[in-house]
Image (cartoon, coloured by chain):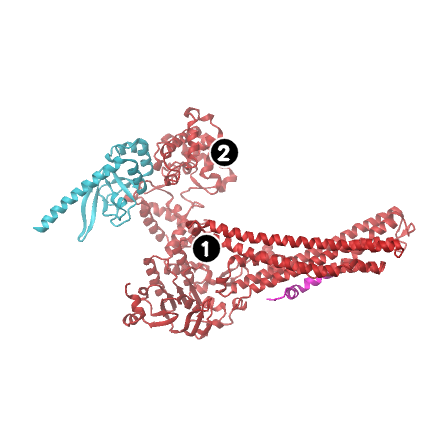
Amino acid sequence: MDKNLYSFILKYSLRQQVIITVLSLISFVPYYYYLSMPKTIVNQGIEGKNISYPVDVMGLGLLRLDNTDYLLLLCVGFLALVLVQQGFKYAINYFQGVAGERMLRRLRYELYGRILRFPLPTFRRTSQGEIIPMVIAEVEPIGGFIGESFALPIFQGGMLLVIFTFLVIQNPLMALAAVALYPIQFYFVPRMQAKVRALGRERIKNQRRLSDRIGETISGVPELHTHDASNPMLAEFSRRLSISYWIRVEIFQRKFMIKFLNNFIQQLGPFFFYAIGGYLAIRGHMDVGTVVAAVNAHKEMGAPWKELLNHYQTREDVKQKYEQVVSQFEPEGMRPAEDQTAEPSEPVSLCGPIAVSGVVLNDDQDQPILENLSLTLPWPARVAVVGDHGRDEMLQLLGRMIVPARGKILANEHNLADLPETVTGRRLAYVGASSYIFNTTLGNNLFLGLRHRPMQPRTREGAEQSRFERELGEALASGNSPHDPDADWTDYAAAGARGPEDITAAAIVALQTAAFDEDVYQIGMRGTLDPEQKPEIAERVLAARLAFREKLSNGALADLVENWDPARYNSNATVAENLMFGTARNGIYQEDNLARDPHILSVLDAVGLRQRFLEIGYEVAGTMVELFADLPPEHEFFQQFSFISSDDLPDYKDLLLRTKPDALDQLPESDRIRLMSLPFKLVLARHRLGHFNESERDAILRGRKIFAETLPSERRDAIAFFDPDHFTISSSIVDNILFGRVAYGQAQAQEKIGRVMADVVEQMRLREPIIEVGLQFEVGIAGARLTAAQRQKLAVARALVKRPDWLLLSEATATLDPRSHAQVVKAVIEARKDAGLIWSLQRATDCELFDMVVVMEHGRVAQFGPYAELCEKHGRFKQMLAPA
Amino acid sequence: MSLNEEVELLRRIPLFAKIEASKLKLLAFTSQRLTYKPGDVLFHQGDPGDAAFVIIGGEADVMVDAPGGQLKVAHLKQNDFVGEIAILCDVPRTATVIAATEVTTLRIEKDLFFRLIADFPQIAIEIMRVLAQRLERTTTDLRTLSAKLKS
């Protein structure tokens, strides 16, 4: 990356700079005429000086105009010049903006690309809070500057020169006097400005620390809560703000002092003109006109001169900023860009023995972590690494995550340090104890290791394609990535699959090995699918629904589920569900909105239940107040059982006190809505409050029909109806198979249903499609919607699915419970039978199934050999095996 | 069965006889009424205890794991309560309870159970009485067994 801003500008935007400069210079011509036109209009057009009418315009005798027509022509000419002049201005501004934005884009892309190539230890010293503002905010002014970096000084300088020349022609002495003070300004102001800029840099540094602090606060917020540590944080933050404040105060003092001096010097000009010129005029050495002309010219020169000074100052500022940012983005040991972009000319296989010789690795304080480590691992081999520190670093070295200070690591006779990431990132896989999960779907996380370059271009048509081509052209013009992020990037062959059709099968194998398949299956069961996109799967879900009902209909399981039956009231579902016979797909038919919804109210009117809902609402509110009034507001029963939150309970209490049951009609609208919203939430079998007798339930069934018939057409997407013959859109798969509600009061209903459900899913071969649905699950920021154990299992599965030559696991399953841990160890060892596996483990007892065991002690290999052999020998390993 | 009927039913159980109606209503509303088929297990020995049960209808057997298989140690019928030891002493379930006929129970969550004891001394006394009876019976059994062993 260019260290100097100007060489960066010239290297990547020379053409644009030339265009902009040339445009600026050409624009002088219309500008000159634009300036002189008013004089011509006044002198010739209006006053008729130095001209005789009719005027022969072109000098050919073709167009002869009298006074008024000529005036009109001159005015039109003036308008045309304004247009041309503004047109140039528009073009120049536009090109400047585009050139600047392209360069800014290039710069940001380059910086981001460098972050991707930073050596890992850099991130221990540099925090997110420092890097992010550099890439986003701090380079912003550079873009604005680049557009005008050449054009502005040339244009304004030219302007200055023109005016100066004009002055010299008028009166050389006065011209010299007008600029006499410029050298002083040019000398002093930037020097004073330098201190302000230094303060500005200080402020930026402080702001980086501020944003770093905020980032840290967000990451560590649970710790701050549990230790009541917000006050020291606030105090610390306050101090940082104070630093910023005082820097700003000093900046203000200096900046406005500069302004003061600047203006003062600027006004010294007229002072001299009036004093000296006036004196000379009185003495008769000079005429008054010249003095006035000099004052005016000096005023004229003020604007471009100010622009030039400003530009000069911004330039210094931006140059420094650029150099500062660039130097931050050149850490030692960064690999070249080709390391990640260049495809290897021929495939490199690392399926072979690993030879580590004389490897030395030091930490930040130059204390040795690994000392002269030498180790040879055969191929294929499944190796356990136990012992004290240095294990994780050794695995990171083997995964080429870091490079050793000294020594060499060969894998299948290739020196790891020489291999590009396009090889090591595909043939090796390292999983640490806290692997990062990205905020996207489970599947995208799982297939991360299969996506290195676009494999299958995405076909676009018509406008979409031309738009894409335009975007691509622009990306190339800014030196950005030429790849299409929407292409299919998945390298199916790397996972052992033929294509999109059997990648899930390959994924399932990896998921099973990592003991993660059941989790994904359960997640998938709670997910949904679009029956229009996957009609065949939806069909199978419907078949499963039938099979499930069949299995439940016999004997002991019969009472577990109450099915959705269009002709019957489901007493295990809410009144709202019974009335609408469907689930809300957006806010319109959400339970809380029903009592004020005109459509719902019209349905209630049609079946004569509106008044009854109000009465039941009154009774339910009474019961709730009676039951829950004595409980403390934070009691969990409110959440579990009450229809009324603890916050609202006092309001309802008031409402009941000022209401008589026979005067419910007279309640204000808002109170009626409050009461009427309660009955919709009743589940008759569960709440058993004795409301809704048989005839009222029949009325609801009638209302169900009317609701569907009168559903406004624009609300068709607001609800998904329960239909025995169709997949219920936006309901989960498990609800679609269940197609009903679990009956209240049946012991162990969930477990029994779960077993039958698993049978049916197996029978209908639905497990794979359901896992596919599970892979669509959005995992949240850093995988927050998964448990810690699930995140680890996902990370292991992600490494397994790309089938690396050597799989390196560094306590990658540490948060799993002992049983799952043992299960994953066993499965992974089995899966890596003819391949390479190196697993750093905490407990020596976990090593039994491995081919080889490496015992580390003080950064060296203390013991190496098969498990059984090490168990016999006296040494570190035997000590580790012994119970404490 | 409506909530009010259930309150009437609870009132007939000696344990709850002296509790005011509104509290019984809360108890009925917040406790799950569960139906078990014959052979269903209310809970297993060794499980963590999170609730106590009152038998509203039906009968159940209390079994403990013994070296030679399961051993029946008690029989539960209507109005008995079970499962209180695990939540009182915070220990795993000390026995397995299996439904002998179709059994209906009221499942009282740990939290609610402690609230009831705290709010109603008569419940605490009733529970103490039952526990004491059980202890007395166990002691008698122990005495008989020791005598047998000695002879």
Tell me which chain appears cyan.
B
Q: Earlier in the sequence, mark 1 or mark 2?
A: 2
Residue A323, position in %: x, y?
Answer: 60, 63
Residue B84, position in %: x, y?
Answer: 25, 43
Read off the chain for label 2: A
Report which residue position mark 1 lands on.
A782
**Of tags 1 and 2, which is closer to the observer?**
1
- Element type where label 2 sits in the image: helix
- Asked whether A16 falls inside the magenta stretch, the response is yes
- Asked whether A72 falls inside the magenta stretch, the response is no
Q: Quadrant of the N terminus of chain A?
A: bottom right
Relative vertical location of residue A780 with respect to residue B114 in this rendering, above or below = below
Amino acid at pointer 1: Ala
Question: What segment is highlighted magenta in the picture?
Answer: A1-24
For the residue carrying disc 2, how many other residues have a C-alpha within 10 Å: few (<14), some (14-19), or many (20+)? few
Answer whether residue A78 is visible to the viewer in this image: yes
Report which residue position mark 2 lands on.
A598
Amino acid at pointer 2: Pro
Relative side of A346 to A870, left or right: right
Relative depth, front residue between A262 and A111:
A262
Q: Quadrant of the C terminus of chain A?
A: bottom left
- Element type where label 1 sits in the image: helix
Quadrant of residue A645 within the rendered picture? top left
**Which residue is found at the position 32% from the left and 61% from the top?**
A822
Question: Could you give the CA–CA distance between mark 1 and mark 2, rounded to whole angstroms?
Answer: 43 Å
Quadrant of residue A445 within the rendered picture? bottom left
Query: Which colour denotes chain A?
Result: red
